[in-house]
Image (cartoon, rainbow, N blue to C red):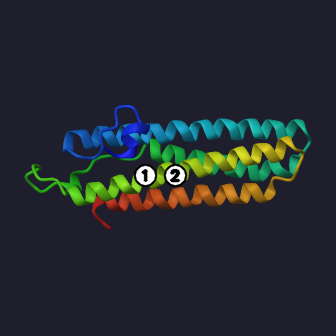
Amino acid sequence: MAILDYVIPGYKGYRLRAESRETDKLFRDYITKLLSEGHQKMETIKVDLTRTGNLMSLNPADSCTKQLTRVRDRLRFANYGFSALFDKGQTKVDHTRLERIEEFDKKMVDQQKEIADQIDKIQSVVDGGGDPAGEFRNLQGFIRTMDEHLNARERMIRGQE
């Protein structure tokens, strides 16, 4: 049983065609929910920055929030389906590619965790009255990495990788 089976309720892995589509949706909904929680924390950070008069940090905070929104919505509304992984008769599954996608998705869980941890780090810096500029740059890098990972995931699902 894969690790995601334990983390995401209802997740069964990408084993069968019928389960693959539903599993993909469950997985994307789960990661989207976690990214939404990060988005909410970023909104709170922006309020804290305004309240404390750290207006110079609002632009980088807003930029991070926009990037996070874009990645979250891209994941939420992505086309899902694994037709490229089945033969023309729709009875045979390319199990190797399904396993690669599942391994790929495990990395996305790790990337989401890096984003969440970085947001928490930003909150700590803001709460301590420090300058979060460097932490915002780090967050942008983590979000960019996840965005690039989504590009690669889409190519893999389409059979282009």
Report the residue that reaches farthest toward the left.
Answer: 89
Q: Which residue is more in the foreground, 129 or 79?
A: 129
Which secondary structure, mark 1?
helix
Name the mark on residue 12: none
Report the residue that reaches farthest toward the front.
Answer: 1
Q: Which residue is more in the foreground, 45 or 74?
A: 45
Which secondary structure, mark 2?
helix
Total numbered badges shown on the rendered structure = 2
The local crowd at label 1, few if under 14, some if 14 to 19, many if 20 or more residues have their Cα within 10 Å, is some
The local crowd at label 2, few if under 14, some if 14 to 19, many if 20 or more residues have their Cα within 10 Å, is few
Question: What residue is shown at x 70% (from left), y 41% (from top)?
Answer: 42
Report the residue that reaches farthest toward the bottom.
Answer: 161
Q: What distance separates the C-alpha of mark 1 from that of mark 2? A: 7 Å
36 vs 102: above or below: above
Name the mark on residue 106: 1
Question: What residue is shown at x 69% (from left), y 46% (from top)?
Answer: 119
- Residue 77 placed where, x, y %? 43, 42
Indicate the quadrant containing the C terminus: top left, top right, bottom left or bottom right.
bottom left
In the image: residue 54, left or right of residue 142: right
Mark 2 and mark 1 in contact (Cβ < 8 Å)?
Answer: yes
Question: What residue is shown at x 82% (from left), y 47% (from top)?
Answer: 125
Q: Amino acid at mark 2?
A: Asp
Report the residue that reaches farthest toward the right.
Answer: 53
Image-quadrant location for residue 1: top left
Per the image, the residue denoted by label 2 is: 110
- Residue 98 placed where, x, y %? 27, 54
Q: Amino acid at mark 1?
A: Lys
Question: What residue is shown at x 29% (from left), y 59% (from top)?
Answer: 158
- Residue 7 placed where, x, y %? 44, 38
